[in-house]
Image: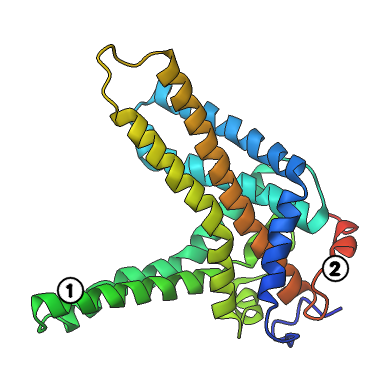
């Protein structure tokens, strides 16, 4: 097995992208019970947090408190699925310090990509100031799209630290994540996007249906059917969001196995399962 402490360990060649995507979907849909245990637990926690925040401070949900709550929920789902993929553990909860470290390092991983977009956009806008309105808008749109793609790719390259956090592997660093993903940026980008397409199509369709339902005229006001539809729709939305999170976490876990733990063996899961947390 390759040495995980060697940040420059040679890769076994290009990522087998189709196999990795198949593994992500196969592992999740072949273990729906394990996924639903994590997803339903954190969906219930989300409902409790929403009710508590709305009851105690109605405006808090739209501010930092609501964002932090959703970040913790997302981290809880991701950690639960990382641990199932990497250690076949079937538990929904993780230690508070693991949750906190996961949220913190996820935010740090996002920062460089966000800085590329936030700093690059005004700089490019200044350089393009001399162009006409139509040409400038077209070029600016293309540049912003490019900056977003670059920013997301940078974030993905730093994100191998997340499955490591989930299983308590302190040997992984941002530097090693960057080195391990070298040469596979396009494949990683395509893979991350590919595993997100089905759940986000479902979320988009569900959001459209909810908006259409709310837009229907009703002279008597909302009835019991409206309330049930709204509640069911909200729960489905949360479950689809949990599915998107688990698929992304699963893809990162597969990358972690393939690119970091053992560049020559794509799935050393049994050995992982015997390691202490």
Give the labeled residue for mark 2.
Answer: 268
Compared across the picture, whether 136 is left or right of 195 comes to: left
Give the percent coordinates (x, y) of residue 132. Answer: 8, 80
* Quarter of the figure with residue 113: bottom left
> Which of pointers 1 and 2 lies earlier in the amino acid sequence?
1
Q: Give the class, few, some or many, for how many residues have Cα within 10 Å of label 2's Cα (few <14, many ≥20).
A: some
Q: Residue at x 57, y 39 (%)?
A: 239
Q: Give the class, few, some or many, for how many residues have Cα within 10 Å of label 1's Cα (few <14, many ≥20).
A: some
Q: Residue at x 9, y 75 (%)?
A: 133
- Relative to 126, residue 275 above or below: above
Determine whether the residue tagged by mark 2 lies in a helix, strand or loop: loop
Compared across the picture, whether 186 is left or right of 219 comes to: right
- Badge 1 vs badge 2, beta-carbon distance below 8 Å: no
Compared across the picture, whether 211 is left or right of 139 comes to: right
Q: Looking at the image, which is closer to me, 26 or 60?
A: 26
Compared across the picture, whether 261 is left or right of 212 comes to: right
Give the percent coordinates (x, y) of residue 203. Answer: 47, 45
- Relative to 161, residue 39 above or below: above
Q: Quadrant of the C terminus?
A: bottom right
Give the percent coordinates (x, y) of residue 263. Answer: 77, 79
Q: Which dot, 1 or 2, sits closer to the camera?
A: 1
Q: Residue furthest top?
A: 220
Give the percent coordinates (x, y) of residue 268. Answer: 85, 68
Determine whether the residue tagged by mark 1 lies in a helix, strand or loop: helix
* Quarter of the figure with residue 94: top right
Residue 277 seen from this side: no
- Relative to 260, residue 233 above or below: above
3D distance between C-alphas at marks 1 and 2: 50 Å
Image mark for residue 137: 1
Q: Quadrant of the N terminus?
A: bottom right
């Amino acid at each position: 097995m390759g040495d995980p402490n060697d940040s420059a360990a040679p890769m076994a060649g290009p990522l087998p992208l189709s196999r990795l995507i198949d593994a992500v979907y196969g592992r999740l849909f072949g273990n729906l019970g394990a996924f639903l245990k994590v997803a339903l637990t954190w969906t219930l926690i989300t409902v409790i947090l929403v009710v508590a925040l709305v009851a105690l401070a109605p405006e808090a949900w739209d501010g930092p408190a609501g964002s932090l709550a959703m970040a913790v929920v997302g981290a809880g789902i991701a950690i639960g699925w990382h641990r199932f993929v990497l250690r076949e553990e079937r538990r929904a909860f993780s230690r508070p310090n693991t949750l906190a470290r996961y949220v913190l390092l996820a935010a740090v991983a996002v920062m460089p990509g966000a800085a590329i977009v936030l700093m690059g956009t005004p700089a490019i806008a200044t350089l393009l100031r001399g162009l006409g309105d139509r040409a400038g808008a077209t070029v600016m749109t293309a540049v912003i799209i490019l900056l977003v793609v670059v920013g997301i790719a940078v974030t993905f390259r730093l994100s191998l630290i997340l499955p490591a956090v989930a299983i308590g592997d302190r040997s992984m660093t941002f530097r090693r994540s960057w080195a391990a993903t070298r040469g596979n940026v396009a494949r990683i980008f395509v893979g991350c996007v590919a595993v997100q397409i089905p759940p986000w199509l479902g979320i988009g369709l569900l959001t459209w249906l909810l908006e259409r339902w709310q837009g229907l005229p009703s002279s008597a006001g909302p009835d019991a059917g409206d309330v049930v539809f709204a509640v069911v729709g909200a729960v489905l939305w949360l479950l689809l969001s949990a599915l998107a999170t688990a698929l992304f976490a699963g893809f990162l876990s597969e990358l972690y196995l393939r690119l970091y733990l053992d560049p020559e063996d794509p799935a050393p899961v049994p050995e992982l399962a015997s390691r202490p947390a």
